[in-house]
């Protein structure tokens, strides 16, 4: 017998293809694992394009079914909700709303959706679990067995919350890593160099040699600075060729080359996060990180909004996790309930919409995301130190400032050292690609995809690249420091105002 209804919150911006895949997987998961309780899906639309908004609305109507209620929450309704609050929360939901009210960012959109969720629950009180997901995720995992539909998500979550004193539960993702390419480049270059070194010793017309059994990378093995999270990884991981049927080494090489540039949209061909077969109930453990695209909580946890959302920092989930860990202790847990994360759409190897990524033909500029990643890291590790020292609400602003300055210095040194390592590896990659004695240069166009990728590495990590330049700009740091400090200083007052709204 079910004990909980579910309210699933899906922020989406300009992604009808991703949203269709997400909702299709939800419908299929429920077909294979029926759940008798009430399930509602709140599609929190952060689009600007009228075509995308209309497409998302049509999808809501298409997937509505008995036991699966679809609620499309468009920008005009969001604007009306915010205007009726009577309280200004610029550091939580941004400035006063104007038309068009889209592209506010996932954090602001989630926070507004949480206000909508609170209203929905007041209108019909019942035991409910709120599930925050992303539109580029699916309700399955990355294994061929049963097409990946192995997990009875709703049954498992219902049982976990019924039998354990849990306030917030975070799952994870499998598939594409949940971080930015801005912090995965060094180790991907390590893997690509290892691939080319191995390929150089193979006969291009012989069967593809990249189908050996692989060791699954540990959590965060995709991250260039995994040591910051207490994780040790190997120097390189092999490339698992995804082609099936008989094919040559050259064919596998060409396929990898053609997909290499998709790395800039969030793929990581050599360090895909894999599914571990552990029963959810056996996997429960204390958590410290929230995967904003896969966490479940009781209505009482609506008191936790996405922190500092208008700054649009990356790492907002881990930052929220540090706050929850300091306050909830054992009632904040993680469980083996991952969702499949697919950053790119099936054709073209690009995401439908990705803020902070600018593209033109085959060129990619991630400088916006690079900057948001760096300052997101500054905020994350500053807050980690502050919560370790005690309740941040009892600390003085001077302690915030001192911590921000210390963490900024440490991370800037790490980022700059990492940039030097990326450029050293890039030089080796270009030398291999330009080596006329290598067999891939005996066949026209075979390595062109790798050359496009290398050019984009230079564009985004070179000595004069916009992203690294921006984080080394003293004036830029002064601007960001003022915003980070104001956000930390006002956080407790913002939470008090938020609680009044709820």
Image (tube, rainbow, N blue to C red):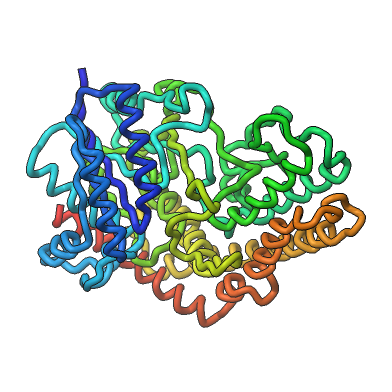
The answer to whether residue 461 is left or right of residue 358 is right
Quadrant holding the N terminus: top left
Along the line of sight, which residue is nearer the eye, 345 or 3?
A: 345
* Residue 8 seen in the figure: yes
Residue visible at 19% across and 30% down in the picture:
67
Residue at the far front in the pictured view:
444
* Residue 385 seen in the figure: no
Residue at the far top in the pictured view:
1
Q: Position of residue 27 (x, y in %)?
A: 31, 32
Residue at the far left in the pictured view:
123
Q: Position of residue 178 (x, y in %)?
A: 50, 47
The vertical placement of 57 against 143, above or below, is below
The answer to whether residue 393 is left or right of residue 1 is right
Q: Position of residue 328 (x, y in %)?
A: 33, 40
Q: Position of residue 322 (x, y in %)?
A: 41, 48
Residue visible at 24% across and 45% down in the picture:
60
Residue visible at 48% across and 49% down in the picture:
345
The answer to whether residue 44 is left or right of residue 456 is left
Q: Toward which corner of the image does residue 409 lie, by quadrant?
A: bottom right
**Numbered circles on residues, count:** 0
Residue at the far right in the pictured view:
437
Along the line of sight, which residue is nearer the eye, 168 or 399?
A: 168
The vertical placement of 241 against 185, above or below, is above
The answer to whether residue 476 is left or right of residue 117 is right
Q: Toward which corner of the image does residue 272 lie, by quadrant?
A: top right
Residue visible at 51% across and 59% down in the picture:
377
The vertical placement of 128 against 278, above or below, is below
């Amino acid at each position: 017998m079910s004990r909980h209804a579910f309210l699933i919150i899906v922020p989406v911006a300009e992604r009808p293809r991703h949203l269709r895949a997400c909702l299709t997987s939800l419908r299929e998961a429920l077909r294979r694992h029926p759940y008798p309780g009430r399930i509602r899906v709140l599609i929190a639309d952060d689009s600007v394009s009228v075509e995308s908004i209309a497409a998302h609305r049509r999808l809501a109507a298409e997937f509505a079914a008995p036991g699966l209620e679809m609620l499309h929450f468009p920008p005009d309704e969001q604007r009306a909700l915010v205007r009726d609050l009577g309280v200004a929360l610029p550091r939580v939901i941004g400035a006063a709303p104007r038309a068009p009210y889209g592209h506010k960012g996932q954090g602001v959109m989630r926070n507004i959706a949480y206000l909508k969720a609170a209203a929905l629950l007041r209108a019909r009180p019942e035991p409910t679990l709120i599930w925050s997901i992303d539109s580029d995720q699916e309700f399955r995992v990355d294994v061929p067995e049963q097409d990946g539909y192995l997990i009875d998500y709703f049954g498992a979550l219902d049982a976990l919350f019924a039998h354990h004193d849990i306030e917030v539960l975070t799952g994870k993702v499998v598939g594409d890593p949940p971080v930015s390419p801005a912090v995965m480049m060094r180790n991907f270059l390590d893997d690509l160099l290892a691939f080319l070194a191995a390929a150089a010793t193979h006969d291009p017309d012989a069967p593809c040699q990249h189908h050996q059994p692989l060791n699954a990378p540990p959590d965060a093995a995709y991250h260039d600075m995994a040591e910051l999270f207490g994780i040790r990884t190997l120097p390189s991981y092999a490339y698992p060729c995804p082609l099936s049927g008989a094919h040559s080494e050259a064919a596998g090489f060409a396929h990898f080359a053609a997909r290499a540039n998709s790395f800039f949209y969030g793929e990581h061909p050599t360090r895909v996060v894999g599914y571990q077969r552990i029963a959810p109930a056996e996997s429960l453990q204390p958590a410290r990180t929230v995967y904003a695209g896969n966490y479940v909580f009781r209505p009482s946890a609506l008191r936790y909004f996405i922190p500092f959302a208008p700054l649009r920092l990356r790492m907002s989930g881990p930052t929220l996790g540090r706050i929850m860990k300091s306050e909830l202790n054992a009632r904040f847990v993680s469980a083996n309930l991952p969702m499949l994360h697919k950053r790119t759409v099936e054709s073209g190897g690009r995401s439908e919409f990705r803020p902070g990524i600018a593209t033109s033909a085959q060129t990619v500029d991630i400088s916006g995301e690079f900057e948001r990643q760096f300052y997101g890291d500054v905020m994350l590790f500053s807050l980690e130190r502050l919560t370790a020292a005690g309740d941040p609400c009892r600390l003085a602003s001077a302690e915030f400032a001192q911590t921000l300055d210390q963490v900024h210095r440490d991370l800037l040194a790490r980022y700059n050292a990492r940039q030097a390592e990326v450029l050293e590896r890039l030089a080796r990659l270009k030398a291999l690609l330009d080596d006329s004695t290598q067999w891939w240069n005996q066949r026209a166009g075979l390595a062109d995809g790798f050359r496009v990728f290398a050019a984009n590495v230079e564009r985004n990590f070179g000595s004069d690249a916009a992203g690294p330049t921006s984080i080394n700009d003293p004036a830029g740091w002064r601007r960001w420091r003022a915003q980070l400090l104001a956000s930390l200083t006002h956080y407790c007052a913002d939470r008090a105002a938020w609680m009044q709204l709820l």
